[in-house]
Image (tube, rainbow, N blue to C red):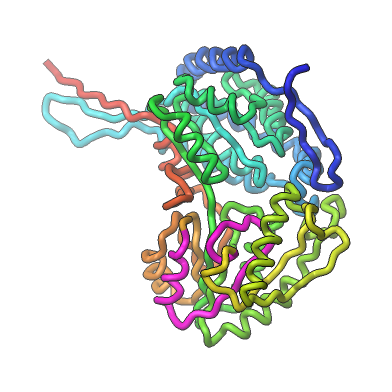
Amino acid sequence: MADTIKIISPIDGSLYAERPLADGADIEAAVVRARAARRAWGETTLPERAKIISHFVDALLLMNDEIVPELAWQMGRPIRFGGEKRGVEERSRYMIDLAATALAPLELPPKEGFVRSITREPLGTVLVIAPWNYPFLTAVNSIIPGLMAGNAVILKHASQTLLAGERFALAAERAGLPAGLFQNLVLGHADTEKLIASGQIDHINFTGSVEGGRRIEKAAAGTFASLGLELGGKDPAYVREDANLDNAVENLVDGSFFNSGQSCCGVERIYVQASVYDGFVDRFIETAKGWTLGDPLDPDTIVGPMARGSFADHVRQQTEEAVRGGATRHLNTRHDLDKPGSPYLAPEVLTSVNHQMSVMREESFGPVVGIMKVADDAEAITLMNDSPYGLTASIWTQDLDAAARLGAQVETGTVFANRCDYLDPALVWTGVKDTGKGGALSEIGYANLTQPKSYHLKRV
């Protein structure tokens, strides 16, 4: 019997789905199909591509009623949130509309006797390795602009959310994308690395762990494939004394606990200026009490299980270590489902924390947040930068000039003021330090999915 990948549902530990792994012949055939399809696709006009890819997006969005419960069963997100339809549509439509501008030839200033321009050519075949935490949102960041730019795309989805890959493939079929232009492959780690090392992939976009990123870099060594890597995060927030506390609390509780804290740009640590610290903490705790744990299939549930019990145990260990070191836990919610080994983990707020505790420096990726008092801007910036990661950082203040000034000092890919945990597709999505390299969305996302080509034409 062929090897398979199993989806074990975090809802009840049952086997939700099982799929056979692609074998060597399947993988080679996919690469050949992609190469053939991209040649014909390259001759398709940009308006025609936009029409077809828009149908692709339409077809995916029409499946949302089926996708929402599938997400709950696969990775635990409560059905009340309606899946990822709104974000998928916003990012996809924006990138489709942006293509004509982002891919337009760059005409250089006139030079007597010459015509000079720079065009953007497709890279070839793009491999998208998508994560389970936002299985549609993260994937469209590269799939849509990758196809619009003229590339073929192969999707390898996370084992926890394999059905998301099938939904993309079904949407491509229903939209009439050329055969082989978009393909979904069920791959294990070894075969994924072998495919990358084959030299038949021109760009790899990966969202996942730092260790996973290192393995991909190693596999790609010597192939000259380009990489886009979004890896770990430990995103900080800084609440200044002039912040609108009601706005800050409402958004930071959501930023900390939405999706059970399993968000790439979720808030994992909060620094609050001393003069407003007590008031902020009191309001934060009161608001967080409303984020209750339960069955994600219940429309009233706000916090569902984490994707796996091992992920929840990691957060439990960080919390327990912090408490042993002197931290105070404020929610300490008792829930029958919340026990060692279970993916069900209630949100927690910690104070009296410090940077000797792993919960303030190492990625949690779960529903726990530490809140620290700071004296001033300088201390806040120092602590915000005391991390190996840098995806986003948020500053909460009514002085946007101060937010920009402080943001320039924070080692991060995106600086927010008075909001968090959101991707604007007009802005590049990128990170620094161990968070990775490259960038998605915006015109820069298109630049990373294409190859510049110069034309230097002399009149004689």
Specify whether 165 is left or right of 452: right
Residue 105 percent coordinates (x, y)? 33, 31
Q: Quadrant of the N terminus?
A: top right
Residue 335 percent coordinates (x, y)? 85, 64
Q: Quadrant of the C terminus?
A: top left
Res 59 seen here: no
> In the figure, 113 relative to 306: above or below?
above
Name which quarter of the figure residue 123 lies in.
Answer: top left
Farthest-out residue, bottom:
275
Q: Which residues are magenta?
A: 359-387
The reply to whether the magenta stretch includes residue 386 is yes
> In the figure, 220 relative to 304: above or below?
above
Q: Residue at x 63, y 15 (%)?
A: 26
Q: Residue at x 17, y 33 (%)?
A: 110
**Residue 412 or 21: which is nearer the viewer?**
21
Res 277 seen here: yes
Q: Residue at x 56, y 84 (%)?
A: 276
The reply to whether the magenta stretch includes residue 77 is no
Q: Residue at x 52, y 85 (%)?
A: 274
Query: Count of labels shown?
Result: 0
> In the figure, 393 relative to 326: above or below?
above
> In the figure, 186 relative to 29: above or below?
below
**Residue 417 or 59: which is nearer the viewer?**
417
Name which quarter of the figure residue 301 lies in.
Answer: bottom right
**Residue 352 or 144: which is nearer the viewer?**
352
Residue 250 percent coordinates (x, y)? 66, 70
